[in-house]
Image (cartoon, helix red, strand yellow):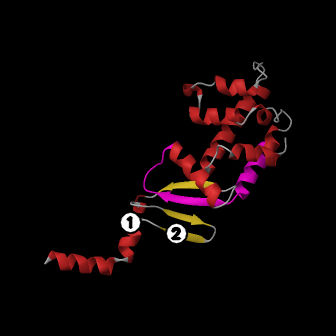
């Protein structure tokens, strides 16, 4: 399986740069254990990944399940000889993908991140990866950067922008 095909499969359920790198790094650890540990005898890599329980993982169960969802075709395309090269190529390919940086006031749930990621892929660019940032000044909205544009839709931005009008209202009703 070609790296571009593997990347496309990974992007089906991976919407942020952080998720991408965490999942690929975990998969590399699984492969290293399977390919280079003399005590490893299991050849079904999906079964190996599924066998990790929450307390065994450097990643969460959602990450483990996402990796399993990539399927046996992706998992079996790595072997002892090509694993390091392919992992490096995948990371380089991810680095080359367009980045949509989203500044939000709180940490979003995985479900909300997936929804946002799917929306961005449908409406912004099909292979974009989100770069999620928490910024408390984005309260009441969000700020995002894409390409060379920054768009601030936070409440603090609109308050700063409309400060003179707000001050007139406060004076008018404060008397």
Q: Position of residue 115 (x, y in %)?
A: 55, 49
Question: Which quadrant, please, contains the C terminus?
Answer: bottom left
Mark yes or no: residue 22 visible.
yes
Residue at image coords 53%, 59%: 102
Specify few, some or many for label 2: CA neighbours under 10 Å numbering under 14, 14-19, or 20 or more.
Answer: few
**In the rendered structure, which segment of residues is drawn in magenta?**
87-110
Say which element carries label 2: strand
For label 1, the residue is 155
Q: Secondary structure at mark 1?
A: helix
Left or right, 109 with reference to 78 = left
At horizontal 71% and vertical 52% (from top left) the residue drawn is: 94
Q: What residue is shown at x 39% (from left), y 76% (from top)? A: 161
Identity of the residue drawn at 63% across and 61% down:
124
Q: Position of residue 150 (x, y in %)?
A: 55, 70
Left or right of 23: which side holds 108? left
Are circles 1 and 2 on residues that touch, CB within 8 Å? no
Crowdedness of circle 1 by 10 Å Cα count: few (<14), some, many (20+)? some
Q: Is residue 106 left or right of residue 58?
A: left
Real-space Cα distance between discs 1 and 2? Answer: 13 Å
**Is residue 59 visible to us here?**
no
Quadrant housing residue 168: bottom left
Residue nearer the viewer, 51 or 109: 109
Q: Is residue 59 above or below residue 108?
A: above
Judged from this view, the residue extending furthest toward the front is 122
> For mark 2, what is the residue?
151
């Amino acid at each position: 399986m070609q790296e571009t095909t593997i990347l496309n499969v990974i992007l089906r359920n991976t919407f942020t740069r952080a998720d991408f790198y965490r999942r690929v790094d975990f998969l590399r650890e699984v492969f290293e254990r399977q390919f280079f540990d003399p005590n490893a005898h299991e050849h079904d890599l999906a079964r190996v990944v599924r066998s990790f329980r929450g307390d065994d993982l450097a990643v969460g169960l959602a990450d483990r399940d996402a990796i399993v969802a990539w399927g046996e075709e992706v998992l079996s395309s790595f072997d002892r000889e090509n694993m390091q090269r392919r992992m490096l190529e995948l990371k380089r390919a991810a680095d080359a993908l367009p980045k949509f940086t989203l500044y939000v006031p709180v940490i979003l749930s995985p479900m909300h991140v997936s929804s946002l990621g799917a929306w961005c892929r449908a409406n912004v660019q099909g292979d974009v990866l989100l770069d999620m940032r928490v910024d408390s000044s984005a309260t009441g909205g969000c700020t995002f950067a894409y390409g060379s544009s920054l768009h601030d839709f936070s409440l603090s931005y609109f308050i700063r922008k409309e400060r003179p009008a707000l001050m007139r209202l406060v004076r008018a009703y404060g008397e």
